[in-house]
């Protein structure tokens, strides 16, 4: 299997090269040049790990079968607190919740980021690359900790995460400051998430910085969902969920996906491209509804204010993986290059809406809270606000047959919003809020929370953007000085 860029036909690389590069040299994203159509029906009795091994083998054709088996074993085992990795909770006969938050950071990013470091290590071996990697990531909360958790203790990788000071929840900050491995660090940066992201991108594109790193045998890369390795790992749960949900193979199953950067929903769309009999794939967004507007009109317009919502991991105006979806629909790299140039220049572009094959809707903040309350009252089940965006979209759609809400975060991660939705009094700190939620759920706390509370968080290190480079030097010094 080769990987090509969405923006030109100049690059065709192997899986290991695509994973190590992250982004293509022309600024495009790597995509598989074709989609195999395996006999999914014969996968029906597979465990999550067996589905993963079989799927990865189709896409990572320069990895050895033994390496794939080993890396899948390391990525999906007791680091998840469910043997099914992504279990389904059925609300009724037809409606299920695909729980993707049983990993160490309680959000769905773990499904890709527990695996990406192993993919990296193996890809380095295949390409005989000796340099270390420095992974720079701006985060609005979930990606940062998931990357830190995945790369924690890896000798040849450093992770520097930057988050907006005051812009993430106390729980998320505590998660990022409570780590025991010196190769991963999180820093607060003055400004909002957009400022933070801009500073990280600027640093990554700075020639001087890049060269200074290379002189120390360090390559720069990112853990964001532009990496094709993440997407492939994310296809596994849709296949597994489909096989778990159908009564007989071929039954139509629909998915409703709470979306931000469009990586998660694209993985579902890729599965349908491979012949998995998925019925509808529905994109649900919060009041930052640029993606819904695009899918309903064909006009992508990022020239609008970014609103702060209770589902912050979906607060986004420019969704990187939309580029891959448009490439899937057209296969036309020069057209995509023009569209992306227009987006960069004008903040908008238009596309033929008749080509779209995803449903979409948007959900107000009031509807999110009402949905959390309704699902608790009707089914005794608690949703986090991101999952509630999808659940509201599902309950208000005409989807027939079995359908799954893709649930991307544990309610514990957003305890304050959940308690507010239920009209409960709010204990003053996040610990009190989590304990109160535990009473309502009536089950043990996830182990990840117990562990978090047993650690003493580091002191917050707060930077202005000009100090980011010095903070990175400090991280390098603390890890590699002694060699
Ligand atoms: C990242 C994230 C999303 C959005 O997923 P995309 O792949 O960016 O569309 C939704 N919910 C949660 C909790 C997330 O962390």
Image (cartoon, rainbow, N blue to C red):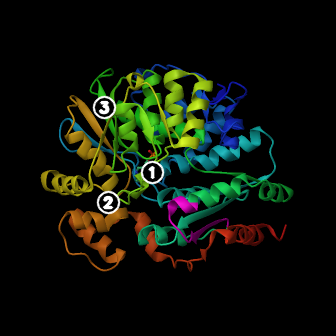
Residue 411 is labelled as 2
The percent position of residue 121, horizontal first and vertical second, equals 69, 47
Residue at position x 26%, y 68% in the image: 437
Task: Mark 1 and ligand 1: say if the CB distance to the nearest ligand atom is below 8 Å.
Answer: yes
Residue at position x 51%, y 47% in the image: 76
The residue positioned farthest toward the left in the image shown? 378
Distance from disc 1 to disc 2, alpha carbons, whole Å, reads 21 Å
Q: Is residue 18 visible?
A: yes
Circle 1 — which element? loop
Q: Which circle, 1 or 3, is nearer the viewer?
A: 1
Task: Mark 2 and ligand 1: say if the CB distance to the nearest ligand atom is below 8 Å.
Answer: no
Q: Left of 94 or right of it: where is 81? A: right
Distance from disc 1 to disc 3, alpha carbons, whole Å, reads 25 Å
What residue is shown with label 3? 254
What residue is shown with label 1? 316
Residue extent of the magenta highlight: 183-196
Query: Which of the image's four quarters has the N terminus?
Result: top right
In magenta segment, residue 195: yes
User: Foreground residue, 243 or 23?
Assistant: 23
The percent position of residue 408, horizontal first and vertical second, equals 38, 50
In magenta segment, residue 22: no
Crowd tier of the residue under label 1, counting other residues whose Cα lies within 10 Å: few below 14, some 14–19, many 20 or above: many
Residue 260 is labelled as none
């Amino acid at each position: 299997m080769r990987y090509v860029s969405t923006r030109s036909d100049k690059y065709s690389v192997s899986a290991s090269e695509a994973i190590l590069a992250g982004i293509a040299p022309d600024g495009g994203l790597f995509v598989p040049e074709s989609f195999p159509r395996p006999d999914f029906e014969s996968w029906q009795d597979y465990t999550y790990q067996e589905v993963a091994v079989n799927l990865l083998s189709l896409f990572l054709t320069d990895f050895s079968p033994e390496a794939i088996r080993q890396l899948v074993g390391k990525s999906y085992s007791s680091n998840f607190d469910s043997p099914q990795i992504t279990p389904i909770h059925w609300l009724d006969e037809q409606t299920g919740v695909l729980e993707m938050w049983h990993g160490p950071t309680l959000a769905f990013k773990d499904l890709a980021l527990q695996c990406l470091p192993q993919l990296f290590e193996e890809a380095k071996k295949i390409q005989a690359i000796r340099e270390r990697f420095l992974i720079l990531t701006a985060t609005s909360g979930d990606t940062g900790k998931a990357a830190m958790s995945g790369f924690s203790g890896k000798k040849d990788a450093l992770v520097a995460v930057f988050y907006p000071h005051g812009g993430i929840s106390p729980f998320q900050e505590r998660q990022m400051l409570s780590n025991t491995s010196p190769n991963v660090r999180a820093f607060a940066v003055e400004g909002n998430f957009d400022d933070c992201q801009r500073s990280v991108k600027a640093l990554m594109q700075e020639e001087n910085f890049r060269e200074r790193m290379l002189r120390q045998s360090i390559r720069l890369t990112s853990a964001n969902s532009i990496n094709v390795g993440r997407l492939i790992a994310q296809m596994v749960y849709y296949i597994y969920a489909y096989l778990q949900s159908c009564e007989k193979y071929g039954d139509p199953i629909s998915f409703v996906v709470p979306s931000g950067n469009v990586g998660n929903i694209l993985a579902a769309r890729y599965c349908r491209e491979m012949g998995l009999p998925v019925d509808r794939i529905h994109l649900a967004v919060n009041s930052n509804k640029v993606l819904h507007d695009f899918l309903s009109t064909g006009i992508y317009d990022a020239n609008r204010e970014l609103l702060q919502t209770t589902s912050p991991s979906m607060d986004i105006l420019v969704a990187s993986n939309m580029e891959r979806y448009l490439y899937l629909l057209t296969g036309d790299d020069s057209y995509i290059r023009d569209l992306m140039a227009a987006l960069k220049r004008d903040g908008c572009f238009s596309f033929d809406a008749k080509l779209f094959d995803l449903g979409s809707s948007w959900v107000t903040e009031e509807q999110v809270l009402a949905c959390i309350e309704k699902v608790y009252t009707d089914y005794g089940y608690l949703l986090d606000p991101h999952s509630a965006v999808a659940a509201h979209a599902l309950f208000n759609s005409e989807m027939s047959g079995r359908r799954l809400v893709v649930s991307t975060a544990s309610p514990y991660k957003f305890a304050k919003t959940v308690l507010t939705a239920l009209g409960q009094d709010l204990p003053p700190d996040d610990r009190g809020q989590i304990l109160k939620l535990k009473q309502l759920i009536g089950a043990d706390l996830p182990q990840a929370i117990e562990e978090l509370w047993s650690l003493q968080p580091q002191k917050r290190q707060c930077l202005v953007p000009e100090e980011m480079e010095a903070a990175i030097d400090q991280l390098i010094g603390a890890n590699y000085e002694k060699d």
